Amino acid sequence: MVPAANIGKLGFRRWHERQLLEGHVWLATGLLCAVAVGVLLEAVSFHGPLLERLATLATAFAAGLIACYAFSAYARIIARAQRLADHSTCTRCGSYGRYALVAASSESMRVRCRGCSHEWLIG
């Protein structure tokens, strides 16, 4: 899925910056949850009440699920931003990220360079 609507509204450079910020927020979330899993597993006391152990283990499990989702979201967002960044240089004049959206489908975008009006397909 190409995020053509957001690129058309914000421009490529601002969209790319926002994607990098969002991706790194997911990375930080994943790291914090991974640390929380370690802390919670360390805090499990097998001498305490059963309900307390189950609550701690359930919280550690939930933090682990969140960490897994956060790391996959990070990878997905950064990969998409990098894939589009790799195709955002005009082959005629060499300007990077300076294009206007001409048309978009669910899989690709047709863009026009703002410097030389050259059109190309980003998919």
Image (cartoon, helix red, strand yellow):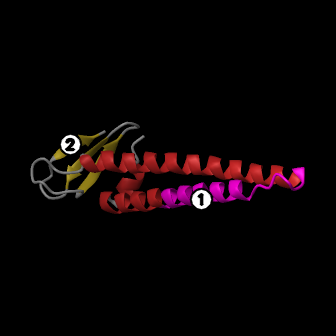
In the rendered image, residue 72 lying in the magenta stretch gets the answer no
- Give x and y (percent) for residue 92: 9, 49
The amino acid type, in three-letter code, at marker 1 is Val
Query: Image height check: is 14 above or below 107?
Result: below
Question: Residue, x 70% and y 47% (percent of image)?
Answer: 61
Question: Residue, x 54% and y 58% (percent of image)?
Answer: 31
Q: Which residue is mark 2?
A: 120
Mark closest to the chain's N terminus, 2 or 1? 1
User: Can see residue 4?
Assistant: no
Question: Residue, x 24% and y 57% (percent of image)?
Answer: 97
Q: Tell which of 38 and 85 is nearer to you.
A: 38
Numbered tag placed on residue 99 in the rendering: none
Q: Which residue is mark 1?
A: 35
The amino acid type, in three-letter code, at marker 2 is Trp
User: Can see residue 33?
Assistant: yes
Q: Please state the extent of the stretch shown in magenta in the rendering.
A: 25-50
Question: Residue, x 37% and y 36% (percent of image)?
Answer: 107
How far apart are the two marked residues, 2 and 1, measured between alpha carbons?
45 Å
Query: How many numbered dots are placed on residues in this image?
Result: 2
Kindly check if marks 2 and 1 are in contact, taking CB atoms under 8 A apart as contact: no
Classify the position of the C terminus by image quarter: top left
- Give x and y (percent) for residue 78: 39, 50
Residue occupying the far left of the picture: 92
In the rendered image, residue 45 lying in the magenta stretch gets the answer yes
Asked which secondary structure carries label 2, the reply is: strand
Q: Tell which of 64 and 7 is nearer to you.
A: 64
